[in-house]
Image: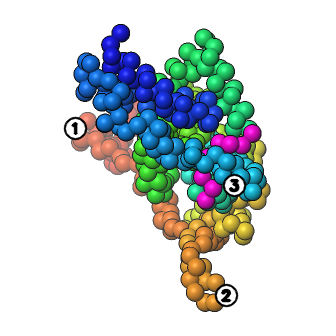
Amino acid sequence: MSDTATAVRVYLARVRTSLADLPASEVEEILEDVRPHLAELESELGPGARVEAMIERLGTPESYAAELRAAGGYPPASEPGEAKKTRAKQGLARPRIALWGLVLSAVAAGLVAFLAGVSLDPDMLLGLGWPAPVFVISIVLLLRDGVGSVMALPEMKWLSTTVARAREKDDTGKAIRWLGSLKPAWWLLCALALVAFGLLLMARHRQAVLLMPFLIAAGVAAVWAGQRVGGDRRLLWVVAPVSTFVIGGLLGGFGATVDLIGNRTPYQNATSYYPSTDEYGNQQLRYGGNQVENIYAFDAEGKPLTDVYLYDEQGRPISLTRYGCKAATGYREKIGEDNRFPRSQIDRSSEPFIDSQGNQAGYRSVCRENTEVPFSAAIPRATPPSSTPAPTTSVPPSSSPSAPSSTPTSPTPTK
């Protein structure tokens, strides 16, 4: 056994001792992040290096452990009593709100992504606005009190103890270490899945191109934070919502694919329509593979018709979901389903929000129902059938029969 390996073990043992007041599972994850750096240092120092050489490069194990504490947001080891008094004074309310605010926001992000993936409707992503206030409050409390108060909660201690016991077992320990080795691949998969999710929405709705910068930014943030979350637990507030969003989007996209394959038939052509269900469970009308939400009818003079009721060849009403504006949020919502056309177009836009003092306080989404026909139709005129008489064929004189003579013929006298 080489001296360098012994020096590394001694250095790690002193770092572990300095972190002994933290949960066991947290210490193990911190040391797992430290080991690759020490292995690189080992190759630089070469054979015969001792603990003193490592201290010259990294500082004492105690100071190195203090840096790890600061990076992870843990309380200093030199003030355990003061930290306990501070936590006792503050109580568990604020750390618990920070923790469960993260949990609820992550679950909500996964559900919204699932619904958007199933319906392939980018408007569903606007549902992320509902858990946003809870997520903001959670981050504010995290930055104010630090991640150490969250990790000191009884539920987090129970989780850390459970994970530490699982690591000690052979089967579960191997599984946990194997899953840990897949972390870099998972964060890369998250980035690729977010971009693919945006492209899938763009294929169905052109306005989804506005989501691409946000999805790309979320993917970059996941790759960056995922590599550092072991040393800084505050980054959990980045990687957890992104991970659940990706999982929900993958499950929803898989469900949409299965539904699309199940609704298609081998004899389908570009001009047929086939039913599928929208997010409310109602049938959709499709033409040429695209969803049809409105139908406009015109008379022979090109005048648009209103209150037209559609039925198929078997007398069944072609009923679709009817949408209207939701006054509380400025987005569209279901108001029923029927077979009356045309429908009102739902136009959404943003307008400045003016407070009571007359100052602009931001923007708000506005929804309007437009009943105008967005285009005009040129109806082709029907051509009446031709009344030209059938052509006659002329017979040459040489082949025409002889006309009867106009001179009377004398009868032959009989005897």
How far apart marks 3 and 2 lie (CA) works out to: 41 Å
Task: Identify the residue under disc 3.
Answer: 86
Dominant secondary structure of the residues highlighted in magenta in the image: helix
How far apart marks 1 and 2 lie (CA) works out to: 107 Å
User: What amino acid is at disc 1?
Assistant: Ser
> What secondary structure is found at the residue carrying circle 1?
helix
Query: Can you say whether 213 is above or below 46 in the image?
Result: below
Mark closer to the chain start, 1 or 2: 2
Q: Which residues are magenta?
A: 144-154
Quadrant location, the C terminus: top left
> What secondary structure is found at the residue carrying circle 3?
helix
> What secondary structure is found at the residue carrying circle 2?
loop
Please report the residue visible at 75 percent of the width from the left and 57 percent of the height from the top.
Answer: 89
* Corner quadrant of residue 227: top left
Q: Nearer the viewer, residue 380 or 351?
A: 351
Task: Identify the residue under disc 2.
Answer: 356
Query: Can you say whether 141 is above or below 74 in the image?
Result: below
Please state the total of marks drawn on the protein image. Answer: 3
Horizontal side, residue 44 vs residue 31: left or right: left
Mark closer to the chain start, 3 or 1: 3
